[in-house]
Amino acid sequence: MTTTLGTASADPGEVDTGRLEVGETRDGSPFGLPVAVVNGAMSGKTLYMQAASDGDELNGVGVIQRVVPKLDPEELAGTILIVGIVNYHAFQVAEHRNPIDDTKMNRAYPGNENGTSSERIAAATFDIATQADLVLDLHQGSTSRMIDEVRVRCGSRHRLHGKCLELARAFGCGYVLDQKGPDGQLARAGPDEGVPTVDPELGGAVGWDEESIQKGVEGVFNVLKHYDFLDGEAPLGSQTRARGFDQYGAPAGGLVTLEQELGSRVSAGDVLFEVTTPFGEPKETVTADSNGILWRTRRLPQVATGEYVCSVATDIDEF
Ligand SMILES: [Zn+2]
C-alpha cells in the first residue's frame, strides 16, 4: 500500500521525502515542514518521529539526518513517518520558541488547525502522530547542559503508563524521567489518544553534540528492533529512573563553579556549587537538600540572584 505524508509518497520497499504544507510565511509564501516516509517491504507497525519541536534543539535533527540514510526499506517491516523540523519559524532563527506567536510548541498539543501559528503546526503533526502505533518526540535540554534521558510524561496513573515506560526502556539512554508533564506536551496528548509516546531528551547543546546524537541514533534503532521493524534484539538494559526534581537557584549574583559532574550521585549536604565575585572571593555555597543525581545545569557561569543553576533528580530507582 502506498503511504503518503504531504508531498512524500512511498510504496512498500521505498523511501520518499517531501514537504507537508501548513500555512504561509509573512511574505505570503507557502511553507512546509520537511517530511519523510520509509515504507517497509513487509507489513508491521507505524512509528512516527519528529525533531526540533523546540527550534534550538538540533540534536534530534542530527539523529534523523543520520538515521534515514541508514534505513533500508527492503529490510523493514512497517512504516516510519518523520517530520524532520517541526518548529519551522523558530528553527529559521535558531530560537527555542516560535517567534510568530512567542509560544513553546510543546505546550500547544494537540493543537488547533484554525488556531495560532504554533497550534496549527501542532495540529498538523498531531494528525500524523495519531496515525502511528508509537511516537518519538526528539528533544534535548535546550542549550543548557543535561544528561541523555527519555521522558515519560503521561503520569503514573495513565492507562498507557506501562507502554510508555516500555518504549522509554527500549530506546535505552540509561536514564528515564517518569513524571507527569505540563498540559500541551505531545508526550501527554499522544497517550491520551492511545498512542505510546515518549520524549527522548538528548543532552543539551548549542548546535550539535555528537555523543548525544549517537545515543539518539542507537535509541531509534533499539526501538525499531524491539518493536520488530527490524531483525535483531534491542539491549533492553536496566534504566535509572527519576520521579522528581529539585531545582537550585543562585542565592547571590556572581560566577558559579559547579562542584559535581553531570550524572554523578549526590547526597544531602554535598556541595553542589559555589558563587564567587569576579575576583574569586567566596560569596555563597549551596548544598544538596536530598540524595539524587545531578541531571541538568546552566551553561553560562554568570548568575543573578535567583537565577537557575542546576537540577538534582530525586526519588531514584532502577527498572
Ligand atoms: Zn524541547
Image (tube, grey):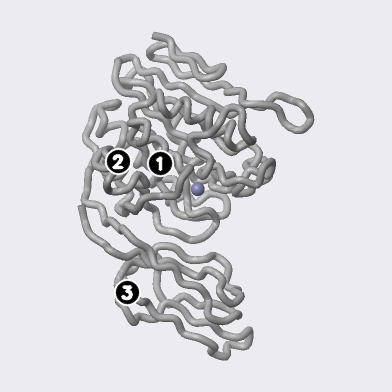
Mark nearer the N terminus (2 vs 3): 2
Q: Could you tell me how many numbered marks the image carries? A: 3
Quarter residue 85 falls in: top right
Residue at which label 2 appears = 164
* Coordinates of residue 150 in the picture (x, y in percent): 36, 48
* Kind of residue at badge 2: Cys
Q: Do the residues bearing badges 2 and 1 touch, measured as CB atoms within 8 Å? A: yes
- Identify the residue at horizontal 41%, vertical 49% (top origin): 181
234 on left or right of 60: left
* Kind of residue at badge 1: Ala
Residue at which label 3 appears = 290
Quadrant where the N terminus sits is top left
| Secondary structure found at label 3 | loop
Mark nearer the N terminus (2 vs 1): 2
89 on left or right of 142: right
Foreground of the two, 72 or 156: 156
What is the residue that sits farthest to the bottom in this orientation?
281
Mark nearer the N terminus (3 vs 1): 1
* Coordinates of residue 32 in the picture (x, y in percent): 62, 26
* Kind of residue at badge 3: Ser
Residues under labels 2 and 3: Cα distance? Answer: 28 Å
Residues under labels 3 and 1: Cα distance? Answer: 28 Å
Residues under labels 2 and 1: Cα distance? Answer: 9 Å
At label 2, counting other C-alpha atoms closer than 10 Å, the crowd grade (few under 14, some 14-19, many 20 or more) is many
What is the residue that sits farthest to the top in this orientation?
1
Residue at which label 1 appears = 187
- Identify the residue at horizontal 65%, vertical 47% (top origin): 102
Q: Do the residues bearing badges 3 and 1 touch, measured as CB atoms within 8 Å? A: no
What is the residue that sits farthest to the right in this orientation?
27
| Secondary structure found at label 2 | helix
At label 3, counting other C-alpha atoms closer than 10 Å, the crowd grade (few under 14, some 14-19, many 20 or more) is some
- Identify the residue at horizontal 37%, vertical 31% (top origin): 193
